Amino acid sequence: MKKENKQGEKITIVNGELTVPNNPIIPFVEGDGIGADITPAMKRIVDTAVEKAYNGEKKIEWLEIYAGGKAKEKYDEYLPKETLDAMREYKVSIKGPLTTPVGGGYRSLNVASRQLLNLYACVRPVYWIKGVPSPMKHPEKMNMVIFRENTEDVYAGIEWKKGSEECKKVIKFLKEGFGIEIREDSGIGLKPMSEFASKRLIRKAIQYAIDNKRKSVTFVQKGNIMKFTEGAFREWGYEVAKEEFRDKILTEEELKKSGGKIPEDKILINDRLADNMLQQMLVYTDQYDVIATPNLNGDYLADAAAGQVGGLGVASSGNFGDEVAQFEATHGTAPQFAGLNVANPTALTLTAKSMLEYIGWKEAANLIYEGISRTINEKIVTFDLAYQMEGAKKVSTSEFADYIIKNIK
Ligand code: NAI
């Protein structure tokens, strides 16, 4: 990785604050599958928006780093240490999707990189862009930000295969130690959820709600069934809210008792069971705002929410730790479309928009939003949106980027 011949400067953190030079070095991973199609499109759009917003005074110095297929070719490993080091060192990075084999092969590189960099909060903003086709009557009612825990629950990846020595040992241990009978032909997975990891995620969600003047934070969990993991998440949530943000929040319970309205300067804190939340999101969409949730619930909720406003082709995402932020689209590698120059680059480009907001380049972020919105309103779209739109002009990935760039200029 040729860091030394780059012109730019590093983003740093001084007293907990992000310090961003005019020419920050931002590492990017192209990604597997459609990554090679959408990542160059995203970079072109971002460069145009930054140039236009700041008359050339600001410029991103892109630094290619490698993970997935390209890394395997270059370094003979899927997730080189140098890649993780660069993500850590440069504080802010963006990545295309990476392939994860199902039911065997290597572990998810996405999960591994989030865990190794301690990016404990996966943050998925879900909102409707005018003109994007949606199955909903009122897609504009969706404006949620989902904070999903990224290091525990099923993402801990603690599993044993049916019939393996480890699995037999665990079954024996549970039987002898606790009198718990488990069928011999079972596979076993563990779902650990700690007070520490749950609280830091919830703290980030509440702080975000306060900083961004959002209305509410909802703890979404399945605590009626999994009392000591999901149920505890809910309890820890209320503890964080009441102990650390007392003067800035009001719980739903407190609101009911007082019978009044939620004051302008307070965030409403409530909780919902995960199954109920999936229907709440459809029926009472605009009553929900910021969501804090354990890993697996968040995985389901974020894709379902994205579906309400146009699908994975337009859903962005970021993974955050205390210092490091890694941005990526919600979708995967869409292998059936890889290399065909047809995939929708919007999700990754909106992800870059979130990245620009994160580094404080809001003017450029707004230009990206406007460029995308205008283009989609002109009914110029990639195949996935064209399929859902009447009278659309279907264009390729690179042509779509060209139209967005024209609309930004
Ligand atoms: P996927 O997100 O790649 O595809 C799901 C569906 O959405 C497919 O019909 C696909 O064609 C469509 N789609 C996704 N992105 C699109 C885009 N930009 N433009 C147009 N259509 C798009 O999910 P799938 O098929 O479950 O996974 C494929 C691979 O991606 C797997 O190896 C999976 O592990 C990996 N993956 C990686 C992620 C990451 O890197 N963060 C996230 C999700 C999946």
Image: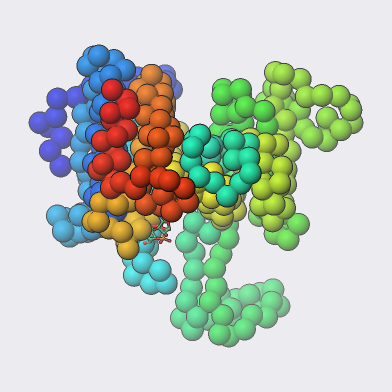
Q: Which residue is drawn at the image coordinates 48% and 73% (left, top)? A: 160
Quadrant where the C terminus lies? top left
- Residue with the most extreme front position: 391
Query: Can residue 10 be seen in the rendering of this structure?
Result: no
Image coords of residue 19 (percent x, y): 35, 19
Q: Residue 300, how many percent across, how many down?
A: 56, 54
Is 402 displayed left or right of 312 in the figure?
left
Q: Residue at x 69, y 56 (%)?
A: 275
Q: Which residue is painted at 71% across and 22% down in the image?
A: 266
Question: In which quadrant of the rendered view does residue 64 lie?
Answer: top left
Q: Is residue 256 above or below residue 170?
A: above
**Residue furthest to the left:** 5
Q: Is residue 160 left or right of residue 341?
A: right
x then y, percent, for residue 378: 40, 35
Q: Is residue 239 above or below residue 33?
A: above
The N terminus lies in quadrant: top left
Q: How is the image coloured?
A: rainbow
- Quadrant in which residue 68 is drawn: bottom left
Task: For residue 73, say whether it is visible.
Answer: yes
Residue depicted at x 67% and y 36%: 286
Image location of residue 46, percent across then percent down:
29, 30
Q: Is residue 115 left or right of residue 260?
A: left
Q: Where on the image, by quarter, is ligand 1?
A: bottom left
Residue situated in front as seen by the camera: 26 or 303 = 303
User: In the displayed structure, would residue 207 be above or below residue 317?
Assistant: above
Image quadrant where residue 288 sits: top right
